């Protein structure tokens, strides 16, 4: 099994390395070989660079794209850069995969949904992003699917792992403050990068191409997530709950985020089984 992992130094890229080397990795990956790349070695937005990389290193069985412009607020002020990384990047990878018959696993986001409807979104629900990040990621989904018939688009949400993420930010703030103010009216699924990485390896082995939702189970608000992180790590810091409107007033440059963006792992359930555990359990494992 030969793999290419792009964006390998990000949270998910790092988790993928751990998942591939773990004892419970699917047997198909035993003795795997992988090329691990990130900026500046390979900019996926650069079509010539992607072609040259594949010319020199392909064939691959599986390409996992963990690369993305993930700064949601930053995407608002630099849509061109967001579109290059999040839309043209997956298109370039998908085209290269198509030439060699490789499977592409491309990771996307709950923020493709507008979040105006309570409950969980299924893979069949119609996306309509309300942020520049969401628009760039939705374009990437479509381009990746259209450019390679063997594409899995895996939407996840509220990711935390080895890197910059909400949980780490909260724990850092808790060391300096007795209380933090956190939005309480946006609901979603906090997801462990480790758990997602394990599922990506399973998804990559199927030929059930198309869109997948993959998040830890259960729904909470950002304020609930912060409080759980404090409780589980033994911090005495408390959470002051605020609304999105109050947050926007304090941070006018911030991107709009969906109120309800929880995802239902329907494709997983219907095919290889949904092994994603409850978010609080996954968070406890991460903090331990
Ligand atoms: N983080 C979340 O809460 C979240 C939620 C839903 C979905 N997702 C999706 O999950 C995936 C993984 O996210 P993550 O949290 O692991 O992201 P991350 O930690 O920000 O890692 C992304 C990596 O991609 C690299 N990168 C950026 N632009 C690139 C380019 N043009 N070419 C090659 N590499 C590039 C980044 O390098 P630099 O650091 O140097 O820029 C970084 O190493 C992404 O597709 C993201 O959209 C994330």
Image (cartoon, rainbow, N blue to C red):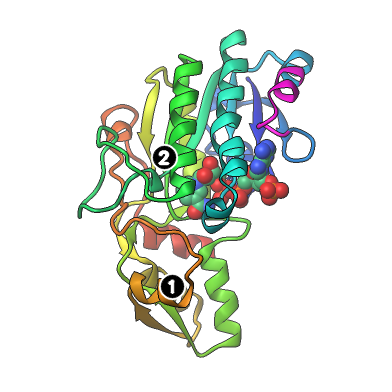
In the displayed image of the protein, which residue is found farthest to the left?
118
CB atoms at circles 2 and 1 under 8 Å apart? no
Which image quarter: residue 184? bottom left
The quadrant the N terminus occupies is top right
Q: Give the magenta range.
A: 43-52
Task: Examine the rendered structure and indicate whether residue 201 appears above or below residue 73.
Answer: above
Which residue is painted at 58% across and 16% down in the image?
95
Whether residue 189 sits left or right of residue 140 in the image: it is left
| Picture disc at residue 21 | none
**Mark 2 or mark 1, which has the lower sequence index?**
2
- Whether the residue carrying mark 2 lies under 8 Å from ligand 1 is answered with yes
| Residue 199 on image: x %, y % | 45, 37
Residue holding disc 2: 155
Task: Examine the rendered structure and indicate whether residue 153 appears above or below residue 209.
Answer: below
| Residue 35 on image: x %, y % | 73, 29
SS at circle 2 = strand
Residue holding disc 1: 226
How much space separates mark 2 and mark 1, taking CA atoms?
Answer: 22 Å
Residue 195 in sight: no
SS at circle 1 = helix
């Amino acid at each position: 099994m030969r793999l290419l992992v792009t964006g390998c130094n990000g949270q998910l890229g790092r988790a993928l390395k751990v998942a591939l080397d773990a004892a419970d990795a699917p047997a198909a990956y035993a003795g795997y070989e992988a090329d691990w790349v990130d900026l500046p070695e390979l900019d996926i937005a650069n079509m010539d660079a992607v072609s040259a990389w594949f010319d020199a290193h392909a064939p691959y069985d599986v390409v996992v794209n963990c690369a993305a412009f993930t700064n949601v607020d930053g995407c608002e002020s630099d849509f061109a850069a967001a579109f290059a990384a999040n839309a043209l990047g997956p298109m370039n990878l998908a085209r290269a995969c198509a030439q060699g018959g490789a499977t592409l696993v491309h990771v996307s986001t709950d923020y493709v949904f507008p979040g105006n409807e309570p409950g969980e979104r299924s893979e069949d629900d119609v996306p309509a992003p309300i942020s520049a990040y969401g628009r760039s990621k939705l374009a990437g989904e479509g381009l990746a699917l259209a450019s390679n018939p063997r594409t899995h688009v895996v939407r996840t949400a509220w990711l935390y792992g080895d890197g910059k993420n909400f949980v780490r930010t909260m724990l850092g703030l808790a060391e300096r403050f007795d209380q933090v103010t956190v939005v309480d009216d946006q609901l979603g699924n906090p997801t462990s990068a480790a758990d997602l990485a394990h599922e990506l390896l399973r998804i990559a082995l199927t030929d059930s191409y198309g869109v997948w939702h993959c998040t830890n189970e259960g729904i909470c608000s950002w304020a609930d997530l912060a409080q759980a992180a404090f409780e589980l790590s033994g911090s005495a810091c408390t959470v002051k709950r605020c609304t999105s409107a109050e947050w926007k007033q304090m941070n006018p440059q911030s991107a709009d985020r969906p109120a309800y963006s929880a995802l239902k792992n329907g494709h997983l359930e219907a095919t290889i089984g949904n092994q994603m555990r409850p978010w609080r359990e996954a968070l406890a494992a991460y903090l331990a």
